Amino acid sequence: MPEPIRGYLAHPSLDGLWEAVRTRLERNSLAITGVLSLVLDETGARRLGGLLGTSTRAGTVRVPLAALDAALRSSSAGCSLITAVTDLTGSALRDRRAERRRRETACAGVWTGLEDALEDAGLAHLAWVPAWREQIRAQGLLTRAGPEAGREAVGAAVRTLAALAPALSASARKPAPTVAMSGLAQLAARATADAHGLDDGRLAGTLVLRAIAAAHALPWPADGAGRRQLWERVGIAADQVSGTALVLGLRPPGDRPWPGMLRARAGMGLVTHLTLSELTSPVSEDPLVASGQIVHVCENPQVLQAAAQLSVPGPLVCTSGMPSSAGWHLLERLHTEGAILRYHGDFDWPGIAIAARILHLARPWRLCAEDYRHALTRLPDTARLPLAGAPAPTPWDPVLADAMHHAGYAVHEETVLPLLLKDLQAGPAAQVA
């Protein structure tokens, strides 16, 4: 706009008017219609009245946009309201309704792309997919990302889920195929062409983790450790050093340094943390046990700690809840080498779910209905905690699930610690069921 009209209209007393007009036009697809109400001081009212050719008083003022447009066109400004507002506010106006419609159309395209990708990958029929899809929609993950980033993340996520499909659709009684799968970086490189494509904070990784949580009916984890555990659910090691398997009394044969180190620690009664990196290193390629050797496995580190204090002969492995990738690798390796694994865990529904997976490799150790009923008789009233969570089947002893459901109480490992320690002190020859 030419001077002096631009300086007249650009006075600070009219700043609120032009910003309000801009907002109204952008919301209204740039249509110059309707009446705007706003508060102007005396200077602003006088200047607006001068433009409109009306007597305008300070206070709340009603401004018809069409009249304002006509006044600008007939004034020395010689331009439309849209041109004037663009000049006075410093940037072109946006048709926000049209932008929103374009975003919605593009977003719909992303969702259609997700459905097509799931169909093409053979995943659309899986039971967890509807819940996963609704979680993504409720969280607005794809909407916030934008169409281009959303399409890229959806493609990478579905390719990853296709690679993980056996672990996602397998029975919960079977352990995740940790030996067959690789680390997170290797999986990301294959599925996303970027070794960091599934890292924390990347949308594709978040989509995959939410799918794993939905497939296992688990809540979204609150921290990085919980997210690593989700990866481990499907046999993927987020890293090879943070997750460990705890062992006591493991005395592998062989005259190389690593077996010698484990025998030395076992001789000193020390607990050893084994990482996945260590267990898959060439230094540990010798057998861990002789075929037929009994290896007890517990869920709670308190059992391992008490066993170490009593200097039980071992070997004893502790999973610390659901095994990490290192834990699964160790159990599978021991099983493959011919060890007889005997597993005990908590008599609660989460513990039963863990046992159902581990007992694909192991035999139950004081983990049947008779053991549960006997433990209940020794359970103090102060330690009677009600069972919580979703009931789980006990295929190794179907009566156990019925007994737990009927009694309604949890029995944790530390409650039966004396019995477990008695078995462990009896040595490798103990054959307690």
Image (cartoon, rainbow, N blue to C red):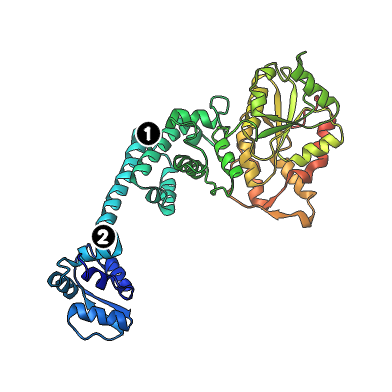
User: From the viewer's perspective, is 397 left or right of 121?
Assistant: right
178 vs 43, nearest the viewer: 43
Q: Earlier in the sequence, mark 1 or mark 2?
A: 2
Q: Is there any visible trace of residue 125 in the rendered image?
A: no
**Which quadrant does the C terminus fall into?**
top right
Residue 318 pos. (x, y %): 72, 35
Q: Is there any visible trace of residue 114 in the rendered image?
A: yes
310 vs 50, nearest the viewer: 50
Identify the residue under disc 2. Answer: 93
Residue 122 pos. (x, y %): 37, 33
Within-10-Å neighbours for mark 1: few <14, some 14–19, many 20+: few
Q: Distance between the residues labelled 1 and 2?
A: 46 Å
Q: Could you say which disc has been placed on residue 181 in the image?
A: none
Helix, strand or loop at label 1? It is loop
**Which quadrant does the N terminus fall into?**
bottom left
55 vs 38, nearest the viewer: 55
Identify the residue under disc 1. Answer: 122
Residue 345 pos. (x, y %): 70, 40
Give the residue drawn at x 70%, y 29%: 274
Q: What residue type is labelled 2?
A: Leu
2 vs 296, nearest the viewer: 2
Helix, strand or loop at label 2? It is loop
Label 2 near label 1: C-beta < 8 Å? no
Give the residue drawn at x 43%, y 29%: 193
User: From the viewer's perspective, is 190 left or right of 305?
Assistant: left
Within-10-Å neighbours for mark 2: few <14, some 14–19, many 20+: some
